Image (cartoon, coloured by chain):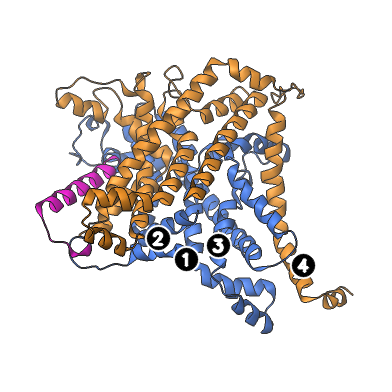
């Protein structure tokens, strides 16, 4: 555990003096390197800049590639939001991603904890079984899921969109590894203090693994927010579309009205960008943490 | 009576009982929503099911059909084209950026954020932005830039040869930030003393890179190769949203396996054949995962 945590700590710490790592002297070569990196970074975000800029333009201006519109307008946003579909899709995505995240964080950490801290016959079987699901691609399951949804009446319901993702093998594996860092003595002490097993997990073990929990939550939320294939299959009612499915159908409908398509794309993207700017450090830390563990 | 029974159990029996109580939802979930569908998929792949009529067992006919289906082979080739172009290109770019960005302190967080942002966005939204970039002359950004530079306009998404790399570009772009962050974490995990020792021995920059950094990054590289390979093999969102009818055109030149599965299953409702294709995808991913385990064990 400590060995695996090192890269993150190494990445987060380090001398914070000087323009370059290890306080290397400033030389022309290093300045060129820095400039190239910055330019590459700006190139990386150009698609967003073009997207937002075009969403603020009148149709006759979109052929003009200037980034700042001559007459900026919010008319595209007013038009796109007018019929309320985007609000609906936005709320659908928010609800689905939130509920799924809560469920995954709860169950994956509970199962991870049980597999890590309880000794019982069949533990390895359960662990290996859950681990083996990591090898099964979603695409292989969508046909049976669709048939299942059809026979249980789950097509075009929130539950139908969510049910395949309410637990994940990846998260369980991740949490099992993180619970290794919780000393067994804490658990024994809590047991002697008269806490029941559920309380020990929730009140003693869980607070000790919050970095892992938040990393898992970020990953799951993002995955559900951007998920496309399954929501596309399971929904035909536009009222139940998630943002990606709604945006795809909206864009097909808008045909060559690129300013409207860019407005829709901006509406789908801006919320995640805002969240990223607020929680940047945690998100990158979480990616490193889960990436290295996974 | 129940409590009496509980009190008579030993501590380890009690713990085992609690463990299984906690595991009930998971056991149900994994059996019903993971394992049953997996076996169900294998079974459907051996039938001629089309959602309307009864499923008949037809043995390996769907697999035999696949071997003779020119579209399947085209799709199979495309899928590996995405993999063999996407993985090396994205890893080389990511490594170069990470290697140099690692040495930068000034505005490090800001530059890193610029590279990382695309990773957090919805692939569908970005596919439409890139689709717009690739449009012909009066509209598309790329062709406008080309014509401003006095170069010939390119067909991009309308060409059977350019469309696949054109669709791959946003997929590579979106994954770079993740790979860079993981590479940097890997680079920083290498103890400074290794570098110092190498420098004392008179090793140059290139030698240090070749003989210390890259070999010690091997687990990171294996991890990223596998993660991005799986990602490129499962490409779908970009192709569905960037090709004119969402059909992997022109002339199937960009259609990946997952899109073919989607069409076979949910446009034509040829569930048996679609399930057989998903089994093939599963086998490809299985081989990649096993290769990863082998490579990691070798280190």
In the image, the segment drawn in magenta is: A22-47
Of all chains, the one bearing label 4 is B
In the image, residue B263 sits, relative to residue A57, either above or below, namely above
Q: Which mark is residue B17?
A: 4
**Mark with earlier residue (3, 2):** 3
Q: Residues within 10 Å of mark 4 (few under 14, many from 20)?
A: some
Query: How far, Cα to Cα, is label 3 from label 4?
Result: 23 Å
Mark 3 crowdedness (10 Å alpha carbons): few <14, some 14-19, many ≥20: some
- Separation of disc 3 and disc 2 at Cα? 17 Å
Task: Tell me the chain of label 3.
Answer: A
Query: Chain A takes which shade in the image?
Result: blue
Q: Secondary structure at mark 3?
A: helix
- Label 2: element kind: helix
Give the label on residue A102, or none.
none
Chain of the residue where label 1 is placed in the rendered structure: A
Magenta stretch: includes residue B187? no
**To which residue does mark 2 refer?**
A285
* Label 1 to label 4: alpha-carbon separation: 29 Å
Magenta segment, prevailing SS (helix, strand or loop): helix
Whether residue A79 can be seen here: no
Measure how far apart labels 2 and 1 are at the Cα level. 9 Å
Badge 2 or badge 1: first in the primary sequence = 1
Label 3: which residue?
A177
Please check whether the numbered discs 3 and 2 fall on a single chain: yes
Position of B56 with respect to B83 (left or right) is right
Q: Residue furthest front?
A: B201
Give the residue displayed 80% in from the left and 76% down from the top.
B10
Question: Viewed as shown, does residue B107 lie left or right of A179?
Answer: left
Colour displayed for chain B in the image of the structure: orange
Which of label 3 and label 4 is nearer to you?
3
């Amino acid at each position: 555990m400590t060995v695996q945590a090192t890269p993150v700590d190494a990445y987060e710490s380090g001398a914070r003096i000087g323009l370059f790592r290890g306080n290397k002297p400033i030389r022309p070569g290093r300045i060129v390197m820095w400039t190239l990196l910055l330019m590459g970074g700006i190139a990386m975000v150009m698609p967003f800049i073009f997207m937002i800029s075009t969403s603020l333009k009148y149709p006759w201006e979109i052929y003009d590639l200037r980034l700042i519109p001559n007459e900026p307008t919010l008319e595209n946003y007013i038009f796109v939001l007018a019929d309320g579909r985007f609000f609906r899709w936005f709320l659908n995505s928010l609800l689905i991603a939130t509920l799924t995240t809560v469920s995954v964080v709860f169950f994956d950490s509970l199962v991870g904890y049980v597999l890590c801290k309880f000794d019982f016959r069949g533990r390895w079987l359960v662990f290996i079984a859950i681990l083996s699901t990591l090898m099964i691609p979603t695409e292989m399951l969508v046909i049976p899921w669709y048939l299942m949804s059809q026979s249980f009446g789950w097509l075009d319901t929130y539950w139908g969109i969510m049910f395949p993702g309410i637990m994940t093998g990846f998260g369980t594996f991740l949490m099992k590894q993180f619970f290794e860092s919780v000393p067994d003595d804490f658990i024994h002490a809590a047991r002697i203090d008269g806490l029941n097993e559920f309380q020990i997990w929730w009140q003693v073990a869980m607070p000790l693994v919050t970095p892992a929990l938040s990393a898992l939550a970020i990953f799951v939320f993002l995955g559900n927010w951007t998920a496309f294939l399954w929501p596309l299959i399971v929904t035909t009612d536009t009222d139940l579309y998630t943002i990606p499915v709604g945006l795809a159908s909206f864009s097909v409908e808008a045909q060559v009205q690129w300013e409207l398509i860019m407005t829709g794309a901006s509406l789908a993207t801006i919320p995640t960008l805002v969240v990223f700017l607020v929680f940047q450090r945690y998100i990158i830390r979480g990616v490193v943490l889960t990436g290295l563990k996974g | 009576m129940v409590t009496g029974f509980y009190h008579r159990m030993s501590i380890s029996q009690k713990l085992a009982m609690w463990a299984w109580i906690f595991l009930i939802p998971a056991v149900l979930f994994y059996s019903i929503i993971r394992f049953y569908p997996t076996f169900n998929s294998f079974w459907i792949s051996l039938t001629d099911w089309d959602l309307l009529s009864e499923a008949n067992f037809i043995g390996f006919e769907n697999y035999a059909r696949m071997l003779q289906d020119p579209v399947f082979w085209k799709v199979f080739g495309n899928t590996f084209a995405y993999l063999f172009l996407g993985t090396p290109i994205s890893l080389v770019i990511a490594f170069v950026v990470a290697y140099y960005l690692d040495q930068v302190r000034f505005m490090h967080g800001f530059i890193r954020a610029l590279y990382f942002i695309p990773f957090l966005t919805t692939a569908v939204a970005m596919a439409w932005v890139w689709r717009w970039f690739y449009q012909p002359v009066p509209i598309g950004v790329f062709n406008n830039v080309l014509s401003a530079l006095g170069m010939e306009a390119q067909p991009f998404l309308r060409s059977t040869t350019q469309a696949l790399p054109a669709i791959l570009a946003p997929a590579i772009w979106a994954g770079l930030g993740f790979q860079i962050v993981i590479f940097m974490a890997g680079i920083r995990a290498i103890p400074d003393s290794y570098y110092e020792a190498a420098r004392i021995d008179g090793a140059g920059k290139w030698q240090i890179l070749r003989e210390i950094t890259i070999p010690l990054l091997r687990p990171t590289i294996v991890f990223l190769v596998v993660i991005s390979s799986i990602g490129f093999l499962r490409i779908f969102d970009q192709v569905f949203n960037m090709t004119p009818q969402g059909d992997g055109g022109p002339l199937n030149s960009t259609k990946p396996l997952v899109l073919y599965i989607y069409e076979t299953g949910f446009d034509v409702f040829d569930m048996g054949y679609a399930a057989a294709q998903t089994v093939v995808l599963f086998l490809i991913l299985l081989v990649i995962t096993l290769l990863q385990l082998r490579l990691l064990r070798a280190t």
